[in-house]
Image (cartoon, rainbow, N blue to C red):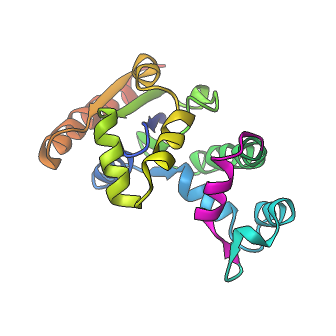
Amino acid sequence: MLVVGLTGGIGCGKSTVAKLFAARGVPILDADVIARELVEPGQPAFEAIKRHFGTTVLKDGTLDRGKLRDIVFSDPEQKRWLEDLLHPLVYSEISRRIATLAGPYCIVVVPLLLETGQKHIVDRLLVVDCPEDVQRQRVKLRDGLSDAQIQKIIASQSSRAERLAAADDVIENVADESSLSDRVDELHRRYLALSRAPI
């Protein structure tokens, strides 16, 4: 199975693109969804986070993701601790799930694929791209974050230039959804062809 990694900066439209591939019957694995499952109450990662950060990161017995985000984006050491805990678990689970899939190719959505040095887990890298000012507008509208919070998140990610330099394929997400869908169709045909190519 051809494994296509889908990445991009916050607010670039990774989820929208993933949904368009899913509508074409392509299996989708999302690192953020897997990470959320790994920090549900009763999971080992949840217990480790609770021990490390205390009850300040809990709300009604579950993880308060907003509170945790505020802590880790204001303290690099705490961010590193959380990443050291979660990233190996997430990538291990991604590998396990890829092995269970059937089909010509799958999409693995990983926002921090380049930042974590894990590009080797995919065969091709698809980057969803848009200008930084568009990113900021979308994140503010979607998440209600302050400019300072958005800047911290953008600063923690690979630069737009770094993502584009690493990409095998790029989707410019600045037009309407019809244009986006046409581009996904084009890439879908390409990935189907590549999946049938002799290795």
* Observer-nearest of 189 and 61: 61
Residue at x-position 79% and y-position 72%: 55
Write down the quadrant of residue 57 in the picture. Answer: bottom right
Residue 42 relative to residue 20: left or right: right
- 168 inside magenta stretch: no
Q: Is residue 158 above or below residue 181?
A: above
Q: Which residues are magenta?
A: 62-77
Q: Is residue 11 visible?
A: yes
- 66 inside magenta stretch: yes
* Observer-nearest of 54 and 2: 54
Q: Position of residue 68 (x, y in %)?
A: 66, 59
Residue at x-position 61% and y-position 62%: 36
Which residue is most to the top?
Answer: 165
Residue at x-position 28% and y-position 29%: 190
Which residue is most to the bottom?
Answer: 60
Q: Is residue 70 above or below residue 192?
A: below
